[in-house]
Amino acid sequence: MLSRPAQRTSPFRRLLLPLLVLAAIAVIIGWARVGAPPQVEITPEKPGLGVATPVQVTVQAPGRGVSTVAVELVQGESTWPLAEIEAKPRPWWRFWGEYTPEKTLDLTVGRQQLPELREGEATIRVIAGRAPTWLRHPAPVVTEKTLPVRLRPPSLDLVSTPNYADQGGSGLVVYRVGEGAVRDGVRAGDRWFSGYPVPGDEALHFALFGVPYDLEEAAKVVLEVEDEVGNRADRPFLDAFKVHPLKHDTIRLDDAFLGRVVPAIQAETPDLVPSGDLLADYLKINGDLRAANAAELVKLGESSAHELLWHGAFEQMPNSQVMSTFADRRTYVYQDRDVDHQDHLGFDLASVRAAPVPASNAGVVVLARYFGIYGRTVVVDHGYGLMSLYAHLSRIEVTDGQKVDRGEVLGRSGQTGLAGGDHLHFTLLIHGLPVNPVEWWDGRWIERRILGPLQTAENS
Ligand SMILES: [Zn+2]
């Protein structure tokens, strides 16, 4: 039987197939594995560009990662580079290893950075490269966002004159704002008092404001207006400013007092964990909790009604004796050591035990509960940022949202919270800032300083 000789394959032919397969794979990967088109997002903080507008650019390139990103601003014939980055994408032949799936650029764009920028329109352009392979170099992805450019703040004209205010006191100012204003009001130090349009005239605004008891310069009380792209104008407006130096007072702390107030406040305030050191816990309450309560009152001020809910003079609690007036700097002494300083911003009014506490004017109850250092507390909103606060109550007799008239009983006086004895802690707040209630107890002052300017404005 004849047998065919075994076929001999040459080494070249044996390698040919795998080489062809490898080449084919290289071609397929080289063709297919270019980076996916990056997803680009351009997010300006404002709906346009102003003097200095924050703009966030996010580039996402899953798979092989971000390679190059260039950001520029285009206006007419001009192009200004804003940012440029070069990241290392994964090599085309590798499926592992580090890469940058997402890159965020925080830029500030505006006249401050680009003095030649003009009003009108400008386009933010992002050129995001795609990771190439040996075979393909795809074009970058170009994303654009065109935005209005506004460089002048709205006009701001003072209407009410003259304007007086006292340190720790209140006032009302009337002014006119120009087109494009989206936020206006009074800034006094680090406090903000929103303005409201005078009913019937959208451009005529007024703001009820308070001067912080510790603000020392009239020039720090300014009218301020801002447009939607963040252009801002301000101007001082006070013609006279009366300073009221802080009074000083000493509070002696003893273990009996700490033992009464500290556990009681902790029991009502879940965030406070007893440390076992009564004095340390007291100082935390007197400092941190006091500050947290103050911040909460500012927040509450934002919910104030856009409506004048009150009428006539505010009333002091009847038959009450003034134990402490507005703005005392208190030194706290424990075992002959000064352990703390805090400012007391309200009136302490003492009457009989569990005396009825009437609303000082008409309004709506916006807080009726245990409230930190103030113990059982009621806050009444009188509209346009003005509120009154009644603290240390033994009993609350109104509920949140309830409408109250002047004189209506809110609860009974007591000594809950940080109180040494049965009394009412009373203060007025404007957008959360405690102000001296003495002015508001005076009907003539209200006519002159609050209602007068408002009526003049309404008739103008
Ligand atoms: Zn008090």
Image (tube, rainbow, N blue to C red):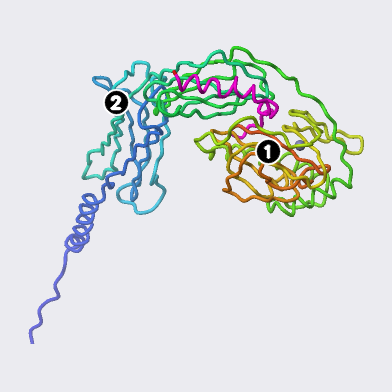
Magenta region? 431-459
The percent position of residue 157, horizontal first and vertical second, equals 45, 16
Residue identifier under label 2: 122
Query: x%, y% of residue 46?
Result: 39, 32
- Residue in view at x 38 percent, y 18 percent: 152
- Quadrant in which the N terminus appears: bottom left
Tell me if mark 2 has few (under 14), some (14-19) or many (20+) residues whose alpha carbon lies within 10 angstroms of its own. Answer: many
Question: Quick one: which residue is furthest to the left in this view?
Answer: 2
Tag 2's secondary structure? strand
Q: Compared to 97, does 137 lie above or below?
A: above
Q: Secondary structure at mark 1?
A: helix
For residue 39, the mark is none
Query: Majority secondary structure of the magenta segment?
Result: helix
Quarter occupied by residue 70:
top left
Q: Which mark is residue 291?
A: 1
Q: Are discs 1 and 2 less than 8 Å apart at CB? A: no
Q: In whole angstroms, how far apart are the C-alphas of marks 1 and 2?
A: 44 Å
